[in-house]
Image: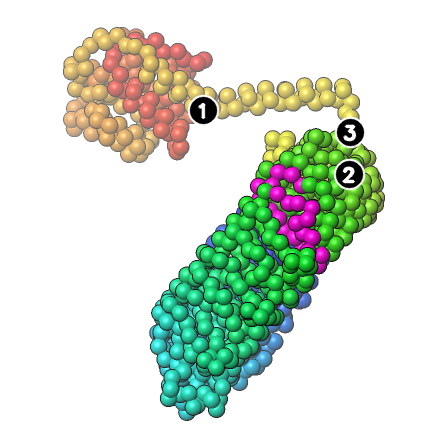
Amino acid sequence: MKVITRTMEPSLVFLLAITCYAMIQPISMLTTMNFCGEKMCICDKGTKMAFCKPALKNTSLSYFPRLPSYITNLTFKNFFRPTITKEDLVNLTHLSLRYLHLELMNIRQIDKGLFQLFPSLQNLSISNNENLSSVTLRDAFQNISTILMELDLTSNNLRNIEFDMFKYLSHTKLTTLILKGNPLINLRAETVENLNLTKLDLSFSRFDDLKSICPTQSFLPLSNLRDLHLQSTIISRNLNSIFICFPNLTKLHLENNNLNNFPSFCDTQELSILQETRSNLEELYLTNTSIKGNISSNAFRCIGELIYLDLNKNQINDVPDFCYPNGQSSVSKLKQLSLEYTSISILRKDSFKCLSSLQILNIKNNVLKNPPNFCSKDNTSYTPNLTSLFLRNTSITSFTGYEFHCLRKLRKLDLRLNYFKYIPSFCDKSNQSINPSLINLDLSWNSIQYIFPTTFRCLSSLKTLVIGHIPISILENNIFRPLTSLKYLEIENLSKLRKIQKHAFNISSLDYLKFTFNNFHFEDLTRYSPEHLFESCKNVKTLILSGNYFSTGSVAQVILKPLKHLTKLALDRNRMHAIHRDTFKSSITLQILRLNYNMLTGWDENVFKYLSNLSDLNLAQNRIAIFNKTSVPMDILNNLETFDLAYNPFNCSCDMIWFRKWSMKTNVTLVLFPHLYRCQSPPNMVRQTLLSFNLTDEDCKVKNPWLIVILTACAGTLFVFCFSLTISMQMPTIKNYIYYLRLRKMGYVKLINDQDFSYDAFVVYCESDENWVIHTLVAKLEIEGFRLCIPDREFDVGAVRCDQIVSAFNESKKILVVLSNNFAKNEWCLWQMNLVEERLRKSGNSATVFVLYKSISSKNMISSLHRVLKERPILTWFKGGTREKMFWNVVCLAVGAPLGEPPISVIQ
């Protein structure tokens, strides 16, 4: 069985991480994922990757597990492992590792030369270990792989970097060094001088001066550098020497720095040098750099080779001037310009002059008072090569077409989030297309209320059309008919859509139709004609109808019947509680079917019998309790490549035994199996996986009724026996509890004033039990404030003991008797017991308190003791837990109660 497994442990955190990873992977790759490394890791044989992460953060990693030999890409994340030695990695040395990533492991110490254990290592990443020092890292790099090409040391809190930190990397092929997220207080040229870097990332650091890594024109330690990342640093000076320091630089990131003005990359003194060694910069990123005002053409005199320019999120008032006074372009090779979130509101008619090479223009998220113009007075185009234009959220209300009529190569136009009340015309005066190459148009989030049959008449080349979040209420006949090349149509979130006319989808070229989240009621036949709905788009192969009310009646088959070439159908989130038996009767070409996120509990056994070509079936997130053998015909079920039945409330009963067996031996890929195939019933199996319930076929056979009667009788007898045994064993505790309730709730008749007594209680006990009596019983009661008479402590030395005992009895309000086996064997104790019985006859049960410290054997059980144990309430000593607490509560209540005759019930 192939299993898509996305969790290393039954942990929601890790489940989400693996699910996110899985969502971006092809199905063919996911089928190779499995547990590995003693279930600490997820391994993917297809990509040769292993991802190891604990179920909980900061879990200690006691050892590095052994992994399959095919692993070349290894990540450990969120473990706690402060020290890593060569011996620790012995289980990994058999791997031909090319990529090793150690993240969030609180690493502090690493053995010298640790990474020489992996001679094939090409990419090493040690990130988010804030207690690592540059010295520790330097020594760990000794004898590292000579083919190492990339080193990532992101966010390790590296402040003071040793000048020789990378001395052991000079013999490697290292070209990429990532130091982002570190303070980098003292980074110097000597640190990187022996490295042949082409990419250096110092972003999100405190780096502030280029001269620290390029001190003089004669000393250029990074002369081969091509890609430099300085975003989110505090750099604001010496940018005019950047191309002297890095003559081969082609990509420069300066985002999120406070530059105030467009950086001056050269001054007059350096201009002659730059003319000899012209800047090779091709990409410049200046997002959110506090640039204000206008940008003149002189700003580009040293960067004339630009291909990509990003000026997003700056307070510039106009499109930069790209024209020299002589009319030549300062950026003749510029292909992509981004001006998103700027302060541009008014565009000059010649704003895009001198951009003849421009292919992609992004002006999204600006408040424009007029649409951009790309045409000169003689109707030639300023931007003849423009292919993509992004005007999303620019507050445009309309355009006449004149502004765009010279964009003959325009292929993609984004007009989302504007204020169009009607779809712009793309026709010239002779009804010819002004944009004959346009293939992608997005009109979503506008105020369009109507689409007419002539609206798209000049867009015959269009292949992709998106209309969503518009207040249209009706799709009229033939509105898409002029789109003779249309392949992809997306109509979504039309909350006011009430009617679809018979031939609205009259598009024979259509291949992909996405009609989603429109809340359209396909059961309401007054809104549309089922037999005609898709009759004129018979070539559709992919139909997505998610987020509507799809029919659960016979009309469902009528809707789908014309689509003879349908291979993918999505009916998820359609509030379906049933599937009509003939729904897919005409869909024999169907390969992928999505029915997830509905309310399905079951369906007729013939629903899927026509889908002999089905390879992917999704029934997840429904209400399926029982998946029968007949739910999907076995020949079709076994022919699937991928099957998803996760997140259903399964009833783990006899009816699901077959599925458990089938899941263990099938070659079908079960998505998220077994972790998210959980039981909802019976109660003892709630939240357990399907693999956990252990019913067998034998358990589910019909039983002999007499056998059931006998077993029931035996079970009843066993229950009575166990109950009786429990009551017998717990009888002392029960007596203590009843004694406690009686003392707390029943009343007393006070006969004698407590002040007439010298002691609250006289303690009668055996000397053999003295240790417990004095240190436990007496100590506890005296802490509670009781006055106790202890013979050896209170009696006078030399006096007659018998007389003193009699006198002490009379001076004590209560007699506290500690019974035990030693007490029963002691003649002196038995003599005192006679006095206790006399006290009982005179003053009643309330005058004495009996405590059973240790059980009395039958051979020592004289008649007087037996009578006491049988007729009087006895407190039994227990050590520990709530039973000890109850014992002390009852003793204190009994000793403290006034004399009288409380109505105490004694369990015999």
Measure the alpha-carbon separation of dots 3 and 2: 52 Å
Please tell me whether mark 3 sits on a helix, a strand or a loop: loop
Residue 616 at what x, y percent from top left?
Answer: 74, 48
How many C-alpha atoms fall within 10 Å of the one at disc 3: few (<14), some, or many (≥20)?
A: few
Q: 892 above or below 225?
A: above
Query: In the drawing, does residue 111 fall left or right of residue 94?
Result: left
Q: Residue 412, position in %: x, y?
A: 62, 61
Q: Position of residue 396 (x, y in %)?
A: 51, 54
Mark 1: which amino acid?
Ser
Three-letter amino acid code of the residue under disc 3: Lys
Residue 463 belongs to magenta span = yes
Mark 1, Cα crowd under 10 Å, few <14 / some 14-19 / many 20+, is: few
- Nearer to me, 181 or 443: 443
Q: Is residue 197 visible?
A: no
Q: Is residue 243 above or below residue 568?
A: below
| Residue at image point 32% right, 16% down | 744
Q: Quadrant of residue 187?
A: bottom left
**Under tag 1, what secondary structure?**
loop
Disc 2 residue type (three-letter): His
Which stretch did the figure color magenta? Answer: 450-475
**Of marks 1 and 2, which one's residue comes earlier in the chain?**
2
Mark 1 lies on residue: 857
Give the residue drawn at x 47%, y 70%: 285
Report x, y in % for residue 436: 68, 62
In the image: residue 755, left or right of residue 24:
left
Residue on which the image places disc 2: 532
Q: CA distance from mark 1 to mark 3?
A: 53 Å
Principal SS element in the magenta part?
Answer: loop
Q: Quadrant of the C terminus?
A: top left
Task: Point out the tag, 1 or 3, that comes first from the N-terminus.
Answer: 3
